[in-house]
Amino acid sequence: MFGNIIIVIVGIIVAIIIGFFLLVAQSHKKVAQGKALIRTGMGGAKVALDSGMFVIPVLHKLEEIDISLKTVTIECMNEEGLICKDNLRADIKMIFYVRVNKDKKDIIEVAQTIGCERASTQETFDHLFHAKFLDAMRMITNQFDFNDLYADSERFRMYILETIGTDLNGYILDDCAIEHLAQTPIEALNPNHITDAKAIKKIQEITAAEMIEANNIISERDKTIKDKELETQGIMLAYEQEKAKREVKHKAEMDKINAQKNKSDSIYDRL
């Protein structure tokens, strides 16, 4: 009888130990790649970035937030092209790389102000940053003539990053890239818009000047070719004239030799 009681007690202890370890295993939540865990409730808000954390049912609430890199794309084309310092428009497409900052305080701030589920959706990123990034692009574009902007796009990109900064209320701007940069086509400009009207005039002036220069280059090339042809013809004519002179001289010499020979033959015959 006593032995049976011992066995029961041991069984209960073993069951308790196993149950404890199972509870511990179930309570420990791991962090997925590109995510962070936020635990609220008893003990206040806590964040796990790498090692995970223990979550006790009822006492704690657990949420997951995406902290992986996201993109915000801004495309300004045709009539929406950005205005440069010289009034020309630039078609620009830029991609910005943004994420929730991998800092516990920033993660909590984003979770509290935006919400874990909405924090990293594309809609949220566009809502939060599209206008801010576009304003920076407009401001910096207006500091460059188009030719300088096109020739030194890396400096333009760096100015954009400096203007926006990296601190974005819990988010961080990692980098940006220029995917497309070109002059806005003249046919996309509005002649009734004062800035576009100036741009159209400037483009036409530049185009006309380039055409004149191109025609001058072509004319100079044709003149050079013609001069070369005339020079070649002159050389050939001089050669033919010299050749003719040599032939006349040779013929005269041969005639003289033949005349002398005939004269000698005639004298010999008389003897």
Image (cartoon, rainbow, N blue to C red):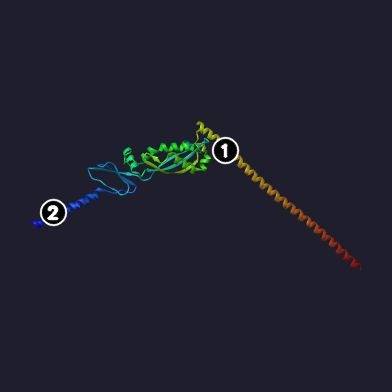
Residue type at mark 2?
Answer: Ile
**Secondary structure category for the residue under label 2:** helix
- Residue 137, given in percent of the width and then of the height, sits at 45, 38
Q: Nearer the viewer, mark 2 or mark 1?
A: 2
Residue 222 falls left or right of residue 43: right
Q: What is the residue that sits farthest to the front in this orientation? A: 43
Instruction: Point out which mark residue 113 bears.
Output: none
In 3D space, how far apart are the residues under numbered discs 2 and 1 (Cα atoms)?
98 Å
Residue drawn at (72%, 50%) of the image: 234
Give the quadrant of residue 261. Answer: bottom right
Q: Looking at this view, is 117 or 224 the one in front?
A: 117
Q: Residues within 10 Å of mark 2 (few under 14, many from 20)?
A: few
Task: Indicate the position of residue 122 as horizontal and vertical percent values.
Answer: 36, 41
**At 26% from the left edge and 49% from the top edge, which residue is drawn?**
28
- Percent from the top left, x then y, of residue 268? 89, 67
The residue indicated by pointer 1 is 206
Q: Name the residue under label 2.
A: 9
Classify residue 9 by image quadrant.
Answer: bottom left
The local secondary structure at tag 1 comes to: helix
* Residue at 41% in and 37% down: 132
Pick the residue in front: 237 or 162: 162
In the image, what residue occupies the spot 40% across and 38% down? 130
**Side (left or right) of 73 relative to 42:** right
Identity of the residue furthest to the right in this view: 271
Foreground residue among 252 and 231: 231
